[in-house]
Image (cartoon, rainbow, N blue to C red):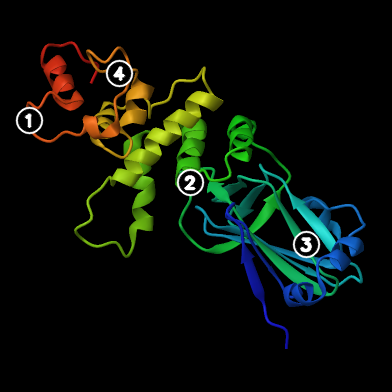
Amino acid sequence: MMKLIPSRSKFGLRIVSVFALAMALFGAEGWVEAETGAALTPAQALTRKDLACAWSGNGRDSLSLTVNNSSDAPLQIDIPAGQIAVNRPNTAKMIVLRAAQLRVPAHGSAEASLPAAALSSANPLVSESFQSLPVSEPRMDGLLKFLSTQPDAPKETAQLATLCLLENIDFQKWEQYLAPQRAGEPASQSHPTPAQVTQAVDAMGILRAVAPGQTFALSSDSGLKLLALRNPWCRAKAMQLYGISIPGADGQIPDLGQLLHTRPGDNCPICRQRALMQQGGSDF
């Protein structure tokens, strides 16, 4: 009996094919020669009686498409960035963040696990069936184009940027969105974590690139600003985003090691900002 052999890529795409072992044994050239037909879109695949398509997701960061092919020919399905899927109760929509190709052998099946994001912070975290929709979300065009050039962008950062574009979410609501996904964390883990603050800073940088004319609640959150400037993971980035320079450094951002806050009054950026705030000269 032939085993399922999964393969993974750095794009977060997982393909599982029942013919993967055959490809390994006989080479991919025969497969390429067999795939002479035009690729199908997900919508076209749904109209084919010899194809059975099943979408599934968890409403947040997991979306997959499984296709069973009963025809005599292998085929390819091109899943575009921007493809939207909705759960059966129509209470959660998700969007594919990067384009993917799914190759399905004749009389076989294949599955694609797709990089995806929730289109609403109200999406429940529930694994269930989804179905594709023949609609688009124009507000996501700039972000999708950006992500096509940044294959290693973290999914959490892409998700936060998505919710900023669609809901203008602030950092407090982002923390609430993350709360259901923290199961299994140690009770001593404090929030927000340095990683979550860094994700927010990176999201602000992306938003500045894809929507320079828009104003976002995330960027004007004074609490997040203070967290970012205190966080050694992202302090240098935060200083650039907020337009903060070090007095006496000719506007240059020093090495990250020089930005660490070690004790009160040590003349680090944090202490200087506190002094300015007390004098009414800061925008914290």
Residue 123 x/y as whole percent: 48, 50
- Amino acid type shown at disc 1: Pro
Residue 154 image label:
2
Residue designated by label 1:
264
Q: Earlier in the sequence, mark 2 or mark 1?
A: 2
In the depicted structure, whether residue 265 falls above or below residue 64? above
- Give the quarter of the image for residue 9: bottom right
Residue designated by label 4:
244
Residue 103 image label:
3
Q: Give the left or right position of residue 269, taking residue 37 as reference.
A: left
Q: Earlier in the sequence, mark 2 or mark 4?
A: 2
- Amino acid type shown at disc 2: Pro
Residue 264 x/y as whole percent: 7, 30
Few, some or many residues within 10 Å of mark 2 (<14, 14–19, 20+): some
- Amino acid type shown at disc 4: Ile
Say how many tags the image has: 4
Alpha-carbon distance for marks 4 and 1?
20 Å
Q: Secondary structure at mark 3?
A: strand
Q: Quadrant of the N terminus?
A: bottom right
Q: Is residue 122 visible?
A: no
Q: Earlier in the sequence, mark 4 or mark 3?
A: 3
Q: Give the left or right position of residue 83, taking residue 178 as reference.
A: right
Q: Nearer the viewer, residue 205 or 284?
A: 205
Alpha-carbon distance for marks 3 and 1?
60 Å
